[in-house]
Every structure is written in C-alpha cells, then in structure tokens.
Amino acid sequence: MKKFDKERLLLAVAGPVIALVAAIALTSVVLLASGRNPFEPYGLMLEQASFSDVQVLIVNQASMYYIAALAVALGFRMNLFNIGVDGQYRLGAMMAAAVGANVSLPSFLQIPLLLLVAMLTGAFWAGIAGILKVTRGVSEVVATIMLNAIATSLIGWLMLSDNWGVQVGNNNTTGVMKESGWFPGIDLGADVGEIYGLVFLAVLLGILYWAVLNRTRFGFDLRATGESESAAAASGVDAKRMVLISMLISGGVAGMSGLPLLLGEVHTYSLSFPAGLGFTAIGIALLGRNNPGGIAFAALLWAFLDKASPALDYATPVAYEKEIATIMQGLIVFAVVISYEAVRQWGLRRQQRQVGAELAAAAADNNTTQKEVAAR
C-alpha cells in the first residue's frame, strides 16, 4: 500500500509541475525572442506580491476563482463540460444584487437570502442545459455556450433603466444594496485593505466538495457515472438523474462565485462587473486536477499572475508588458493538457510493467512448487 500511495502521489504532482515548468520555459523563450531578459519579470512579480496590500488582493481574487473552479470541477468529475459557468456566475450575481437593492431584512436573514438567490439562479440556468441533455441529448458544451450568450443579453436588457437598471454616470447598475446585505470582512488597516469575509465560504465549499465526493454514496455514484454510465446503470444508478443533479449543483456553486466581490466590496452589479471568470476557472480546475487542494493552489497562482503583473508596466529602466502574465496563463492551460496525457500514459506503462512482473513472479513460484511436488 505504501508503494502504491507514493506512486499515486507522484502521478498526481507530476502533471501540474511539468505544466508549470513548461509554461515558464516557453514564456522565457518568448521574452528572449523579443530581446528581453527571460528571468527578470518573474522577480518583479514576486517583489510586487511581497507587499501586504497586493497579497490581500490576491487572496480576494483567488476566492472567486476557487468557487468558480469548484463549479467546473464538479462537472468534470461527472464527465460533463459546464462551459456556462461564466453566464451562471454573472446572472447569479446580478439577481442577488437586484434583490439586495430592493429587499431590506435583518443581516442574519438578508445575507442567507442573497446567497440562496445567487445559488438558485445559477442552478436554474445550468439546469436548462441539464434538461436539454437528458431529454434531447443536446451536448452540454453547445447548450452552455449558447446560454452564456443569452445570459449576457438578458443581463443587458434587465439593466436598462426601464427595467431594473439604475443609471450612475455612464454606467447602468442595479442600485446600491441595503447595508444589511454587506458581508463584513477582515480589516487589516487602511494601507493594506480588507479580506473578503466570504473567503471562508470558498474554504467551506472546498471542504464540502471533498467530503461529498469522497465520503458519501452520492459522491461515489457521481464519480462512477462519470467513469462509465453503462457500468453505473448496471449497479442501479440512474445516469440521467445524476447528470441533471450534477448540472444543478455545478450551476448553484457557479452562481455564488461573484458574491465575495459583490457582498464584500462593490455592493452593486454594473456593466463593469468582471467577465470571463468562468473561462478562467476551466484552466484553474484543469491545473488543480479537480482536487480541492490543487484547485486552491491553482487559484492562488492565477490571482498572483493577475495582481502582480501590473508591476511589469512600471519597471525601470526597461518596462515589460503585463500581458506576459496572460501569455503564461495561456501556456499553462496548453501545457496542462499535454503534460497530463503524458503522465497518464507513463502511469499506464508503469502499471503494465508491474502487472507483468507480478504475473511472472507468480508463474515462477508456481513452477517451483510443481517441481517440489514432483520431486517428492
């Protein structure tokens, strides 16, 4: 067992490590080809991340990335590609903001209400793709991509001043939320900033994700269905039901992705609310191998690249474009796919060699036993 556990740990770590090393190497080649120092940008970003205020920004950003990546990972574990996390996240945040601006309850009721609204909105939006898949066989990839576009248009329509929108300068918003819906954070001082209180929601969701998948019958059924629907059906699992439930849960988690920012800082939804979070979450879930610990590391890495990269624009005497960090993020995703497949093939070959060695040893023992019996 100890040998097996060591090999499994090695296989789990090898993929992300190879991907990171490859991404850094390829980014360095790009810098070198452009006549820049291939190592200095990394030092500049690490120096930027050493400041306490930047560290707070990294943690806050990582909390949003982490929740969205958990939503993607839930689909991946079911062998589903929920590409619609971005639409589910934005629609959930917008609905929560609208309710928060028009409903006033005590904090102990207001905050759970907003969490529930965001979760149910995301679940509803993802459930449309789930129903289309189980009833009509529509690919969840196509359905969720189309639902992203529909969500963008629906949000734009709802944000019109004739509907729910409140004009603030040149920006349409849902109006400022009631203060009872603001979630308090950890204030580290005026010069440092405040850590979102809902960072702890991300931690809780990570623990629940691990516990449900690894310690419950539902989690076993979900993983079994993701591995083989026919095998799961043979053991009594309703594969279609599991697909629909998985999409609903994935969408519900996605709907809460924007709440750390919404309840912890901006307190309104506007047309400038961050977009593209769901697509970033796909790369984070891949790098983290759908493991809650791995996803946490990947979310922090992505947030570090986002928040530390502006230092490249102000470097002296030679400035570097902050898009270097974006190049690295893209190369990480590219390298992840290749490295994981290479590690998987390596693992299969190791298993085949081990099985062959064990069979050969068993055959040798059997021949020895037969010779001893014949000698008697």
Image (spheres, rainbow, N blue to C red):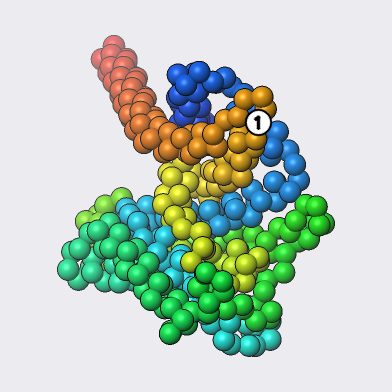
Instruction: Describe residue 202's horizontal placement relative to residue 190 as left or right.
Output: left
Q: Position of residue 152 (x, y in %)?
A: 37, 67
Residue 155 in the image: x percent, y percent? Answer: 41, 72
Residue at (38%, 35%) from the top-left corner?
A: 334
Question: Which residue extends farthest front?
Answer: 169
The vertical placement of 180 against 11, above or below, is: below
In this rendering, position of residue 257 left or right of residue 229: right
Amino acid type at mark 1: Ala
Residue 150 visible here: yes
**Residue lying at 41% horizontally and 66% vertically, measured from the top left:** 88
Q: Is residue 130 above or below residue 80?
A: below
The answer to whether residue 232 is visible is no
Q: Residue furthest left?
A: 136
* Depth order, front residue of 146/288: 146
Instruction: Determine the secondary structure under disc 1.
Output: loop
Q: Which residue is mark 1?
A: 315
Q: Is residue 151 above or below residue 38?
A: below
Task: Say which residue appears at 53% left-offset and 74% top-offset.
Answer: 173
Is 361 left, or right, of 109 in this rendering?
left
Quadrant of the image for the C terminus?
A: top left
Towards the viewer: 376 or 66: 66
Q: Is residue 103 left or right of residue 252?
A: right
**Which residue: 41% across, 60% down?**
85
Of residues 269 and 81, the one nearer the viewer is: 269
